[in-house]
Image: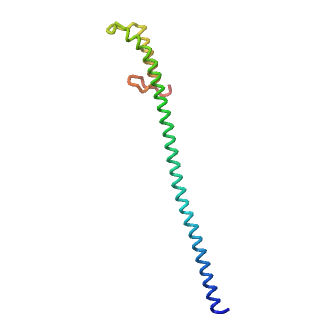
């Protein structure tokens, strides 16, 4: 072998080793970049899931509040005609009428237990 062939072979080997080294480094760096992108996308997915759960819970709370409002309105609307036609606003209530009002209060508290004046629910019952 001539010196020129030997130098060419060594140069070709060094070039091949450098190319292989760059290829491996590029694959490793590309993997790290993809791992970072995957982590970002995973966090975005988790945030979107939490937002969707919050929106569902908010919608459910709104529906419950609207249902309580409808129940309360139904209870109150039964007494409006009577209240508009009473002439005895300063007299003591009859026992029957007081019982109806207590029943209405109880139904309002069942519909919305967090109203002021409603008894605090007991644990377990």
Kindly identify the residue that appears in the image at 49 percent across and 34 percent down.
59
Kindly identify the residue that appears in the image at 40 percent across and 14 percent down.
80
Residue reaching furthest to the left: 90
Q: Nearer the viewer, residue 101 or 16?
A: 16
Is residue 91 placed above or below 42 in the rendered structure? above
- In the image, is 121 to the left or to the right of 12? left
Q: Give the x, y percent position of residue 83.
A: 38, 12
Q: Give the x, y percent position of residue 16.
A: 62, 78
- In the image, is 29 to the left or to the right of 108? right
- In the image, is 122 to the left or to the right of 29? left
Q: Give the x, y percent position of residue 24.
A: 59, 70
Q: How is the image coloured?
A: rainbow
Q: How many marks?
A: 0
Q: Give the x, y percent position of residue 54.
A: 48, 40
Kindly identify the residue that appears in the image at 60 percent across and 81 percent down.
14
- In the image, is 17 to the left or to the right of 62? right
Kindly identify the residue that appears in the image at 62 percent across and 85 percent down.
10
Q: Quadrant of the N terminus?
A: bottom right
Residue reaching furthest to the bottom: 2
Is residue 122 placed above or below 76 in the rendered structure? below
Residue reaching furthest to the right: 1
Is residue 77 placed above or below 34 in the rendered structure? above
């Amino acid at each position: 072998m001539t010196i020129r062939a030997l130098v060419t072979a060594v140069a070709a080997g060094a070039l091949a080793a450098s190319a292989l080294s760059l290829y491996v480094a590029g694959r490793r760096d590309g993997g790290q970049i993809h791992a970072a992108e995957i982590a970002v996308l995973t966090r975005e997915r988790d945030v979107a899931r939490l937002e969707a759960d919050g929106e569902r819970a908010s919608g459910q709370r709104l529906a419950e509040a609207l249902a309580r409002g409808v129940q309360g309105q139904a209870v109150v609307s039964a007494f409006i005609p009577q209240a508009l036609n009473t002439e005895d606003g300063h007299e003591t209530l009859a026992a029957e009428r007081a019982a109806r009002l207590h029943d209405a209060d109880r139904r309002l508290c069942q519909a919305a237990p967090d109203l002021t004046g409603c008894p605090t629910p007991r644990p377990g019952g």
